[in-house]
Amino acid sequence: MSFENLSRKENALDERWFDRFAELSFETYSLLDGDSEVRIAEKNKFLAQDFGNPTLDYPKLKGFDFIAREVSLLNLKAEIIDNEDDITIREIYRTKINESLAELRMLKSTIEGNDKKFNRYSTFVYGAPDEVNTSIMASILQEKVERGKSPVKQEAAANLSPILEVLVPVVPERGPPLLEIEDSKERVATVDEVVSAFTQALQDVGAGDAWRVVVSNDIGISNFRVSQKNKEVSIPGHKIVGMLSQTMRAFLQHEVFGHVARRVAGENSKLKLLALGLDRYEKGEEGVATRLEQLEKGADTFSHPERYFAISLARGEVDGIKRDFRQTFNVLKQYYVAVLLSSQTGPTLEDKAADSAWRLCVRTFRGTTGSTPGTVYTKDLNYFVGNKETWALVKTDEKVVRYFSIGKFDAANSRHVGWLMKLGITDQSLKNILEESNDQS
């Protein structure tokens, strides 16, 4: 089946439902942003002492109407179940709305300060670390620590060993095929050149004037971001000048060709929900996006093992000890002391390690109070696991890459593949690749 045959007809199969669901959709991660000034003050106070946890604020949730949103989602789900004739469309929307309801209730538990309830919903939506992936991650980090050993880092490495060596090493491949990309020392000179590159990329993927590039100077947000809700690609203006141009291009691949392009493809498919994503699509989405990033800048391990480590560490999946924000920070700081490069100018190694550990802990404990050991936001598991599964599919059959361009779904999810086959959006070949990849794992 060629992609030319996958373009949306005049009426998509879910034409009557998509716009109504899109109106009720929300971006969970962005609602968990804190106020920059408050977070900086908390960071300074936290780093100045060696006890206690920071107070994590969530100002965007204060005016959020949880009750009205939940009622509307429940009513829409009931209407679809009662009135949609196609059983596949019915099931696709039922599971997607159930996921949205779980995220909504998770956010409500954030406002309530109910960490245990938040943890249950986060695990339901995003999953939890498993033994195999945790072991692979630990062996990757062990190697990074070994490579970074030096007299000044000896103590940090020694402190990490008892934690990382708890897990039994596993046989599965620990990373993608080694991607040796020639390093370039060229650096970004102006913000304008980045805006221009991203704007052109949006045109290249067919986003047209519906999408825009915005420059964010919110110092609390240091990453490139895509807002599906607002159709915006956000560039961290305060971080971009001086960045390696190769790194910038890798982010461009991730955000525009990984996220926006799949949104545009979904809008033009027979199933418009592929624009926003099937339930639990994010693992496949981040897998595709991180692989594109790696193809630009090179790679020798799966993407973001540190994010997987932070979640596993806090939850007690690594050594059986559940940790709160402070306890997780203390271990992560040791890790970054062991692996970060030190220089004679700029921040000291200790300061760089503390900053990296703080930023990762804030990501990991988003949505929680930070004070309940073992309670974290498990969304960031998607980067490591999704990247690993995407590489496994590509290794099985490189032709799988053409299916990545259909829209927002997880090609390693057999439910998704089955649904899309029934709707005539994919063919038997994708199912065969998935089954063969599973047989090899």
Image (cartoon, helix red, strand yellow):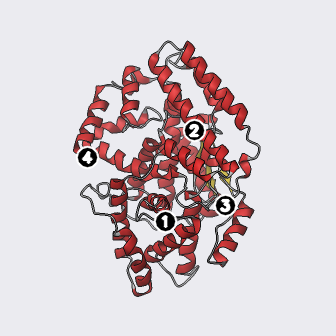
- In space, the residues marked 4 and 3 are separated at their CA atoms by 40 Å
| Disc 2 + disc 4, Cβ < 8 Å | no
Left or right: residue 301 versus residue 249 is left
Task: Name which of mark 4 and mark 3 comes first in the sequence.
Answer: 3
Residue 416 falls in which quadrant of the image? top left
Q: Residues within 10 Å of mark 4 (few under 14, many from 20)?
A: few
Q: Secondary structure at mark 2?
A: helix
Instruction: Give the image location of residue 437, x and y in percent.
Output: 26, 41
- Front: mark 4 or 1: 4
- Front: mark 2 or 1: 2
- Front: mark 2 or 4: 2
The residue beneath circle 4 is 441
- In space, the residues marked 2 and 4 are separated at their CA atoms by 31 Å
Residue type at tag 1: Glu
The residue beneath circle 2 is 102
Q: Nearer the viewer, residue 149 or 317?
A: 317
Residue type at tag 4: Ser
Task: Name which of mark 3 and mark 2 comes first in the sequence.
Answer: 2
